[in-house]
Image (cartoon, helix red, strand yellow):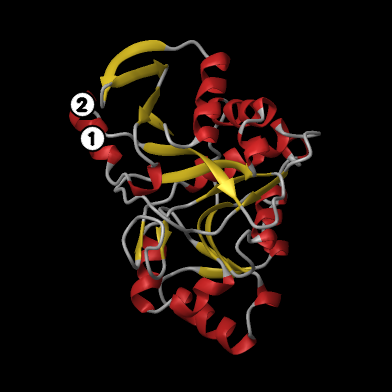
Amino acid sequence: MRLLVASVPDVASLAQRDALLRHAHWDDAGEFGGRAALRSGEVLLVTIPDLHLYHDHVDREVEIRFGTRPELVVFLSKHRSESGTPSLTVHPLGNFGPAEYGGQPGTLVPTAPNFMTEVLRGVRREAAGLGYAVTFESTHHGPLLETPAFFMEVGSTEKEWQDVRAAEALARAILGVKPRAGLIGIGVGGGHYVPRLTDVALARDISFGHLVAGYGVPLLDDTMIDQVVARTPGASVVYFHRKAIEKPVLHALEARFAARGLASVREADLVPLATQQSY
């Protein structure tokens, strides 16, 4: 089961939920937390009354209610940025340091690399011509879960949060996602939106799990690296935005990931996506 979670206090989340309702046939699945739960094939859609960032363990709650632990949790959300740039983003969950916006300090949530990266590609395709930047964000904020999860967001102002076209692009991407099998990696370096890692994911056959922005690099002690690796299931490589990391730091990180069995790769080492899947 794939679980989609909408949040009542988040206007963009509700807009995405409404778009999902328009783009698929949904059957009544009973109640969850006093609100209707809906099912479409192997997808379960629930709506929680509180803000998703602080609603830990919704995966456990769903298992108790429906008898099945979801294999994947996707949170429908708004995105806010100081620049106000119209954007559609996906990102993993967790905190490399303090937990300022939910979750637990120094704790990462398992990722879903094949799903998350393919959703990024699908959003790029579905949102073509809408004037939105489509990008990863680095790993950040809550909630805390045991199930692989990611956020799917529209931003960055109230205008975009209520944009039906953007909500429908996200809905089509998540409903139509077919995860790719293949190389799985961890991405390190760059700004919060990890533009280099986004470009590589859109051009090359690699699926990323946890994404570490430059500000998170100083927090990559051995314990945190162990978490990054363990919570990127199937990871065999690490891709560094080399120009964004000082060489001594880069070389030290390459050695520490290599000690855990992850080779450092460059873009030229990665197979290009097939022409029909290029964006």
Question: Local crowd at mark 2 within 10 Å, few (<14), some, or many (≥20)?
Answer: some
The number of callouts visible is: 2
Q: Which mark is residue 65?
A: 2
Q: Where is residue 78 in the image (x, y as percent from the top left)?
A: 55, 41
Q: Where is residue 116 in the image (x, y as percent from the top left)?
A: 53, 44
Q: In this view, does 143 lie above or below 5?
A: below
Given residues 175 and 200, the one toward you in this image is: 175
Callout 1 secondary element: helix
The numbered mark at residue 136 is: none
Q: Quadrant of the C terminus?
A: top right
Which residue is rendered at x = 62% and y = 39% of the image? 158
Vertical relation: 47 (above or below) 263? above
Q: Which amino acid does label 1 sit on?
A: Glu
Q: Quadrant of the N terminus?
A: top left
Residue 256 drawn at (x, y percent): 45, 79
Label 2 residue SS: helix
Task: Return the residue nearer the eye: 120 or 102.
Answer: 102
